[in-house]
Image: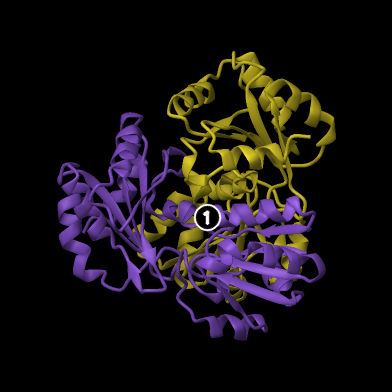
Chain colours: A purple, B yellow
């Protein structure tokens, strides 16, 4: 039996009771920690969950999938994912492969940044296609194309930002704002930056792209992960919510 | 202090450890149960959480907001929401109002149908605007407009379906398929129906709108909630995933 278990956004205590119960029944517990980052150590997780954790790095998660699935044929295996379960193609493939091999698989969902951005007051139903900005973005225009498409439809655009937890590299909303300005988005465009969503004290800042950049670049140092939103057409209730994040 | 706590998708055990800890520290616990439905009773929740639960019906959640906020000025108050916290305008308003009144408010996120649909194999980043189909839809074309917009951009469309848990009314994916056909969407359009996302055994069916309707109308009776997706342009990995749900 394979359990794909979402861990939520922040630390070891964001797991659901159901997720914890499943882990406790497992013989092997893998943790995929290279597509995002929690604010706790693996040993914090091991202590709370009462199990040793095997780190699934990029190699293991991608090429070692067969190994995990064959283990799940005879054992209870948990595969822990930060956020919700289907945040990355690898996890979809693991689920699909397990099904193909007739290995029983159960999904235990959890919170995701895709809905945690609701804290901004922007309606979740009015987001368009989501895009992400990679570190190496000198020649990358896909995020701009997505933004233009969403904008023309009056929809909000969520920019997810590149990260490399293994190296401790996290793109900041300030860097994302800079990228957007460099690619020709007017510096006067309204935007919303978010940091540490899912924490006790998440950061939300609403401002012009240019000012946002100045305002949060130093103030939010170390507050990760971050993301950036350019709102589309606003309902007045959304506008009011955003204005609360203006100072 | 006001805690807005997501309960996730299925039953009382989908709450996070952090959410449960917060409830245990609360003097008053409200539960908003009119925008969705869990597969457990309020007394199951009371038993596990160790607290009496006050049902916040449509009236209390909307017009009694001032009462809840003033209670949270001197007491610890939990407001429990099915799915993730910011799924409805009411919850955004409650959060915003609390902030305005300088009442401390903490959000504890949880799983949402908006990311649980990832189980279909469709990439979450490739969904367009989300829309919902109301019961009284004879003259409603907004969902069709949203679908046409998403389609022209190659994006997937998620149709959320109306429900009235107080009356036990839940629109089914089969009814939604029928509505779409009546409004002129070709019956040969590929679609994906989902039922009981977040449960141990969620239903996913991929088929033409017309056949989907026939296939699940009786087979999925009572399996709620349901939703419907019309996929946009498919990557071959998405196509393969969907085909697994074809029989």
- Label 1 residue SS: loop
Relative to B240, does residue B119 appear above or below in the rendering? below
Q: Nearer the viewer, residue A95 or B22?
A: A95
Q: Nearer the viewer, residue A27 or B177?
A: A27
How many marks overall?
A: 1
Identify the residue at image location x=18%, y=62%: A215
In the image: residue A87, left or right of residue A196 = right
Q: Quadrant of the C terminus of chain B?
A: top right
Relative to B75, does residue B43 appear above or below in the rendering? above
Q: Residue furthest right?
A: B218
Relative to B10, does residue B122 appear above or below in the rendering? above
Q: Nearer the viewer, residue B144 or B127?
A: B127
In the image: residue B23, left or right of residue B173 = left
Q: Nearer the viewer, residue B49 or B55?
A: B49
Q: Position of residue A29 (x, y in %)?
A: 66, 74
Identify the residue at image location x=48%, y=22%: B148
Identify the residue at image location x=15%, y=46%: A187
In the image: residue A239, left or right of residue B42 = left
Residue designated by label 1: A88
- Res B52 seen here: no
Q: Position of residue A164 (x, y in %)?
A: 39, 67
Chain bearing tag 1 is: A
Q: Position of residue A156 (x, y in %)?
A: 36, 41
Q: Residues within 10 Å of mark 1 (few under 14, many from 20)?
A: some
- Res B96 seen here: yes
In the image: residue A109, left or right of residue A184 = right
Q: Position of residue A114 (x, y in %)?
A: 47, 52
Identify the residue at image location x=81%, y=37%: B220
């Amino acid at each position: 039996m394979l359990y794909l278990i979402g861990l939520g956004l922040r630390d070891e205590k964001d797991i659901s009771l159901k997720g914890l119960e499943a882990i406790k029944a497992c013989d092997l517990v893998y943790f995929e920690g290279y597509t995002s980052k929690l604010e706790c150590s693996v040993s914090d997780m091991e202590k709370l969950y009462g199990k040793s954790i095997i780190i699934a790095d990029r190699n293991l998660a991608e090429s070692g999938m067969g190994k995990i699935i064959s283990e799940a044929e005879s054992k209870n295996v948990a595969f822990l994912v930060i956020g919700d379960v289907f945040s990355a193609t690898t996890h979809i493939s693991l689920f699909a492969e397990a099904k193909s091999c007739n290995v029983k698989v159960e999904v235990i969902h959890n919170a995701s940044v895709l809905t945690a951005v609701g804290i901004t007051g922007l309606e979740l139903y009015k987001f368009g296609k989501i895009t992400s900005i990679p570190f190496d973005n000198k020649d990358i225009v896909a995020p701009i194309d997505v933004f233009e498409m969403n904008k023309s439809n009056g929809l909000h655009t969520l920019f997810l930002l590149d990260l490399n937890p293994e190296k401790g590299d996290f793109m900041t909303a300030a860097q994302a704002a800079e990228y957007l300005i460099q690619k020709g988005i007017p510096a006067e465009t309204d935007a919303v930056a978010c940091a540490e969503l899912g924490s006790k004290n998440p950061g939300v800042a609403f401002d012009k792209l240019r000012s946002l950049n100045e305002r949060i670049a130093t103030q939010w140092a170390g507050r990760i992960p971050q993301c950036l939103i350019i709102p589309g057409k606003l309902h007045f209730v959304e506008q009011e919510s955003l204005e609360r994040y203006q100072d």
